[in-house]
Amino acid sequence: MQFKSHINKLIRIQTSENRDIKKGVLLDRNERVESFDEGTYKKILKSISRFSINATPDIQDLYKLLSKTFKINKKNIYIGQGITELMSQIIFSLVKKNEQVILMDPTYPMYDVWCKLHGVKYKKWKFNKDYKLDVKDLKRIINKKTKILFIVNPNLPIEYELSTQQKKEIYRICKKNKTILVYDEAYYHFGSKSEIKNSINKDIIVMRTFSKAWGLPSIRLGFLVTNKKLRDYLSKCRSLVETNALSFQIAMWALKNKKILNQHVNQIKKGSKYITREFKKISQPYIGGQVTNAMLVKLKTQKDVLNLKKYMEKKKIYIRTNFKNQIENFFRISLGSERKMKIFFKAFLKWKLINDRSN
Ligand SMILES: Cc1ncc(COP(=O)(O)O)c(C=O)c1O
């Protein structure tokens, strides 16, 4: 059989398989660490109409509710199956042969995967050795061939939020090169500044998700906001409908119960405060925990990182490793309640003791 060579060459690694979701401490995928309590779960199920299962979904009510919640005209909103699907549709529909994309590096790995799957060339705007982005470096790589600049703001795994000044400068550079500026604001609700209002009349796209602060990665739902012309064009990429009946009703339930989001964000802030304090006490280097729900933690060697992962896995505490280049000696933890952070930290201290003794 003749395969497409660029797809054939692509290596996909499925992370986080075989976790004990019920009993484990899930710190590896930036999800909601705490499961929903029984009462909330029942309410979510109750929000799904019996009459919605047998029909093709009509998600107009979700458009209306998103419009009301975020005070954005629904003509500027397009819903997709998570930011991840929207990223793909943006690349697929906008980038022509000989055009390029710019990605931050390191960032959410699916950007790299989509570019490769769509056979699109990309350049990397790399973090410097102080774990910061310099607009001067962007100026060096952007040109008239750059169709899209993807900015994850705030970014992960290196947590970084661009300043207002940097964003203004970036927009100016994009306008000059006729580059569409896409902001991935997956972590917005943890306390960063948004570009959503700016995106309505400009060639700026802002993407949001239900996967992070809303705590619903399972429903695979997100949306983008941009000018009407671009919105209408991108929406041609939708499948039969944007999403399924279960997902859109759960998203509506979430939007009507914003206190769940607020409680979740508060819980993470408390967890972050606790773990930051403990890390400082033992002079443990880390990055993040301010405007996202994650933290990068530095160990001495890559071997230590692998060791720790195995040690934690035995205790059903799942952490993210396998980072490359300048962050290869780091592992990442998602932030959750103080209780879950305590479980992690206790195990971390134990491992450190064993590891220090054996070195
Ligand atoms: C920056 C960023 N964007 C998007 C996503 C995924 O969003 P979604 O679940 O809406 O596809 C992630 C998940 O880790 C992420 O880190």
Image (cartoon, helix red, strand yellow):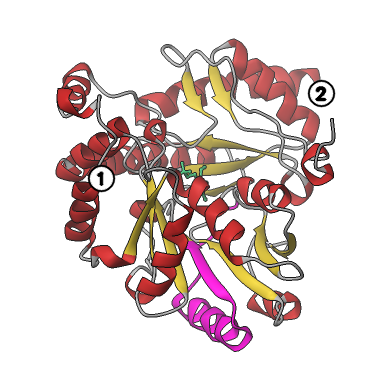
Task: Report the quarter where the C terminus lies.
Answer: top right
Within 10 angstroms of label 1, few (less than 14), some, or many (20 or more) residues? some
The quadrant holding residue 31 is top left
Q: Is residue 10 left or right of residue 77?
A: right
Residue at left 41%, top 35%? Answer: 217
Task: State how many labels appear.
Answer: 2
* Residue type of the residue flagged with mark 2: Asn
Question: Measured along the vertical axis of the image, is residue 6 above or below residue 310?
Answer: below
Within 10 angstroms of label 2, few (less than 14), some, or many (20 or more) residues? few
Question: Measured along the vertical axis of the image, is residue 340 above or below residue 183?
Answer: above
The answer, for residue 35, to whether it is visible in the render is: yes
Read off the magenta span.
Answer: 158-183
Q: Which mark is residue 359?
A: 2
- Residue closer to the observer: 115 or 270: 115
Residue at left 63%, top 84%? Answer: 177
* Residue type of the residue flagged with mark 1: Ile
The quadrant holding residue 236 is bottom left
- Kindly identify which residue carries mark 1: 59
Disc 1 beta carbon < 8 A from ligand 1? no
**Which numbered disc, 1 or 2, marks the residue closer to the eye?**
1
Q: Is residue 178 left or right of residue 30?
A: right
Q: Where residue 151 appears, x then y in whole percent?
A: 55, 64
| Secondary structure at numbered mark 1 | loop
